């Protein structure tokens, strides 16, 4: 069955984009001019570019995981996963654009280690700690690493997508086993890149601070956000009659992933916070002090949203099979993880000046509209059910 984007869906995404543009314009007009305005604008660009890019990367990781473990149940929702990860080229484009502007603006007060004066011993702004990290944190090496990350992601995305379409035409198991090998290789790359890229793109904003759990913590948020989008999109498509082979057991399995990854994220949030709080070392607690002192509601609120809601409302078997519950909780979880990214980025770039206004809401709605529109368009490019997947029959008869 071929998916077709309806006029209603087109109007919905266009409405989101228009509202996002209007809110963003209002935010720009009401924001102070000068460096603060540029920093706030680029901060929000980085937050939203990374958030939606990360969802696509999470989908790519999840598909590779299914290939590497030769999982059978997922075949019926494989094309939904591919549609989400199909946002990757657009996400890469937005990320490169934001990084380019930040770089030519010498960090734009977001990446403090890009500012030339902090590395000049004669400057009153010279920073000894940043100077010690400059072998790793410098513009050329930052861009080399970024190009490698994005290039590898794009390469594997194209390979998985092309082989998936080819499998529909020729069948057999040769392509399946090639995906199995490529999936295992990608997981090796991702095990490294998911941490190092989060250090480069997010943790280096708080250049004087570091955490050995930060990479895992960021990865858990990415994975949970991707699973949440997957379950919401699957439920929507099933409601429209496009996924007749998806049953309650498939929905239950995706719901379990949402539940499990929410707990994984919560565990890592608590582990990172508790260990640093207990040690109470000045250069480590500064990260939390900034956020707790200036916006405790956002910081602890997003933890409650991302932990309490899934724990209380997705614990039971029935809840993981109920479309209404999964959709409402999924939207709440997505907003919670957006707040997590907002706190991670804004706490370091804007500090006490960070707040959510028209600009923040507008850019979120704008990027959400683009994200949804791209995914819906991706769904039209191939049959909703993979024709010759070797595990399709197992998936169709999946029951738990």
Image (cartoon, grey):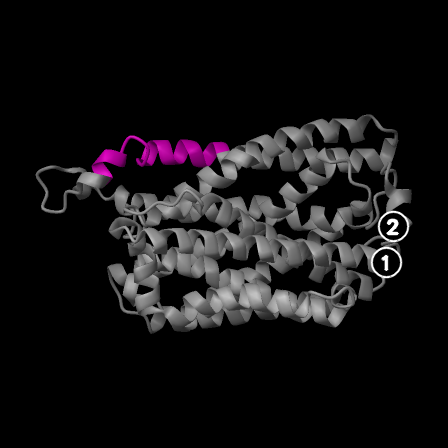
What's the residue at 57%, 52% (across, down)?
Answer: 264
What's the residue at 48%, 57% (across, down)?
Answer: 48
Task: Answer left or right for 184 relative to 110.
Answer: right
Q: Distance between the residues labelled 2 and 1?
A: 8 Å
Q: Earlier in the sequence, mark 2 or mark 1?
A: 1
Determine whether label 2 and label 1 are within 8 Å by CB. yes
Count residues near mark 1 (Cα–Cα under 10 Å), then give few for <14, some for 14-19, many for 20+.
Answer: some
Magenta-colored stretch includes residue 135: yes
Q: Residue 124 carries which label?
A: none
Residue 17 shows in this picture? no
Task: Answer left or right for 346 relative to 123.
Answer: right
Name the element at disc 2.
loop
Which residue was labeled with disc 1?
Answer: 247
Residue 55, position in %: x, y?
58, 51
Quadrant of the rendered structure where residue 289 is? bottom left
Can you tell which of label 2 and label 1 is closer to the viewer?
Answer: 2
Residue 223, position in %: x, y?
60, 50
Front residue of 337 and 310: 310
In the figure, 128 relative to 280: above or below?
A: above
Which residue was labeled with disc 2?
Answer: 398
Q: What segment carries the magenta color? A: 130-148
């Amino acid at each position: 069955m071929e998916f077709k984007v309806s006029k209603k869906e087109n109007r919905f995404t266009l409405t989101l984009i228009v509202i996002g543009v209007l809110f963003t314009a209002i935010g720009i007009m009401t924001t102070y001019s000068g460096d603060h305005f540029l920093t706030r604008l680029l901060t929000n660009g980085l937050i939203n570019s990374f958030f939606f890019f990360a969802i696509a990367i999470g989908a790519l990781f999840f598909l590779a995981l299914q290939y590497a473990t030769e999982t059978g149940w997922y075949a019926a929702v494989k094309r939904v996963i591919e549609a989400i990860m199909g946002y990757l080229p657009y996400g890469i484009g937005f990320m490169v654009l934001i990084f380019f502007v930040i770089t030519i603006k010498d960090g734009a007060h977001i990446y403090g280690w890009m500012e030339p004066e902090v590395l000049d011993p004669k400057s009153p702004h010279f920073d000894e700690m940043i100077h010690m990290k400059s072998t790793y944190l410098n513009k050329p090496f930052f861009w080399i690493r970024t190009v490698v990350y994005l290039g590898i992601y794009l390469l594997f995305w194209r390979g998985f997508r092309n082989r998936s379409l080819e499998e529909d035409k020729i069948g057999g198991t040769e392509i399946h086993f090639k995906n199995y090998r490529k999936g295992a290789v990608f997981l090796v790359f991702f095990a490294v890149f998911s941490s190092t890229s989060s250090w480069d793109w997010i943790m280096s904003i708080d250049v004087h601070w570091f955490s050995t759990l930060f990479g895992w913590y960021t990865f858990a948020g990415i994975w949970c956000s991707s699973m949440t989008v997957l379950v919401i999109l699957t439920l929507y498509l099933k409601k429209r009659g496009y996924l007749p082979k998806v049953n309650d057991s498939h929905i239950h399995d995706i719901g379990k992933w949402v539940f499990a990854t929410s707990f994984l994220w919560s565990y890592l949030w608590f582990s990172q916070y508790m260990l640093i709080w207990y040690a109470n070392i000045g250069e480590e607690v500064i990260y939390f002090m900034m956020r707790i002192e200036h916006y405790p509601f956002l910081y602890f609120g997003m933890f409650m949203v991302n932990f309490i809601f899934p724990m209380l409302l997705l614990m039971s078997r029935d809840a993981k099979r109920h479309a209404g519950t999964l959709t409402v909780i999924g939207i709440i979880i997505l907003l919670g993880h957006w707040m997590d990214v907002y706190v991670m980025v804004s706490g370091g770039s804007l500090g006490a000046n960070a707040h959510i206004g028209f600009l923040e809401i507008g850019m979120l709605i704008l990027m959400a509209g683009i994200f949804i529109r791209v995914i819906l368009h991706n769904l039209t490019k191939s049959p909703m059910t993979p024709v010759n997947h070797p595990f399709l029959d197992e998936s169709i008869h999946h029951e738990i």
